Image (cartoon, grey):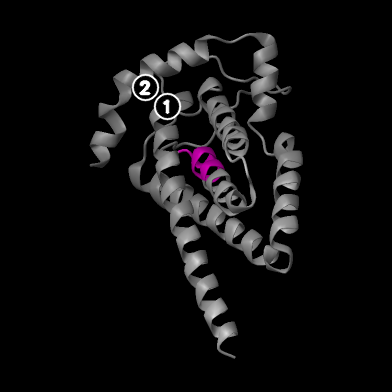
């Protein structure tokens, strides 16, 4: 299985990453390098968690804690378990590929860690986005603006990884699969515990 994941997807990934990474310009280089980090997204996070506080009030700390634990879990699964298990080298470490890599001010090139399957950026961002949507959805009359906004965040955040040459597209897809599983599991668990808490409160 590991051999299949490591090698059989390369031809398709070669073509896609060459297409995305090859469409580079100086201003895109600066933009993608900035957007691949967490700090440009901090205003969005403040806004989202502010909405959670307004919607859930005294329960908001439980919601935020669940989201934080879910994102941490997706990071452990992707980085701590699957990457060492699969051992799939990042494209930036593949001598068969000639990629445009981000050059740091000290002259070194950003290559990321040795392994890239699945993408932790994809796993963590999709976990975060899905849970934000699921928790805020009941309080919105129009749900599609939030869905589009969060989907745009995930797509751009993950696109930067392919553009920078540190992830194959299938690394991103695998990370999304991890994020979907973790976020839906966490939300189901929250609903179960919240319902149980309400029942205990009701019968006191």
Instruction: Read off the residue under disc 1.
Output: 169
Q: Secondary structure beneath disc 2?
A: helix
* Mark number displayed over residue 13: 2
The residue at the point 59 percent across, 31 percent down is 157
Q: Position of residue 126 (x, y in %)?
A: 52, 42
Say if 179 sits above or below 70 in the image.
Answer: above
- Closest to the observer, 108 or 33: 33
Label 1 SS = helix
Q: Position of residue 53 (x, y in %)?
A: 74, 58
Q: Is residue 119 above or below residue 55?
A: above
Q: Quadrant of residue 116?
A: top left
**Which residues are the magenta region?**
119-126
Query: Is 120 contained in the magenta span?
Result: yes
Give the CA separation, mark 1 to mark 2. Answer: 6 Å
Residue at 40 percent across and 42 percent down: it is 177
Res 49 seen here: yes
Residue 204 place in picture, x, y as percent: 59, 91
Q: How far across and down, in percent of the image, does residue 145 sit?
A: 62, 34
Residue at (38% x, 30% y) in the render: 170
């Amino acid at each position: 299985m590991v051999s299949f994941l490591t090698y059989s997807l390369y031809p398709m990934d070669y073509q896609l990453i060459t297409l995305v990474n090859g469409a580079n310009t100086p201003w895109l280089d600066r933009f993608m390098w900035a957007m691949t980090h967490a700090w440009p997204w901090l205003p969005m996070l403040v806004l989202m968690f502010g909405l959670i506080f307004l919607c859930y009030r005294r329960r908001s700390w439980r919601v935020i804690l669940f989201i934080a634990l879910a994102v941490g879990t997706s990071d452990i699964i992707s980085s701590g378990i699957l990457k060492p298990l699969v051992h799939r080298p990042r494209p930036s470490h593949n001598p068969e590929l000639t990629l445009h890599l981000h050059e740091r001010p000290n002259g070194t090139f950003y290559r990321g860690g040795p392994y890239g399957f699945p993408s932790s950026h994809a796993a963590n961002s999709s976990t975060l986005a899905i849970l934000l949507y699921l928790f805020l959805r009941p309080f919105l009359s129009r749900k599609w603006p939030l869905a589009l906004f969060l989907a745009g965040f995930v797509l751009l955040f993950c696109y930067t990884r392919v553009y920078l040459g540190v992830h194959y597209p299938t690394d991103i897809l695998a990370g999304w699969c991890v994020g979907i599983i973790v976020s839906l599991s966490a939300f189901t668990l929250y609903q179960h515990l919240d319902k149980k808490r309400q029942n205990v409160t009701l019968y006191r």
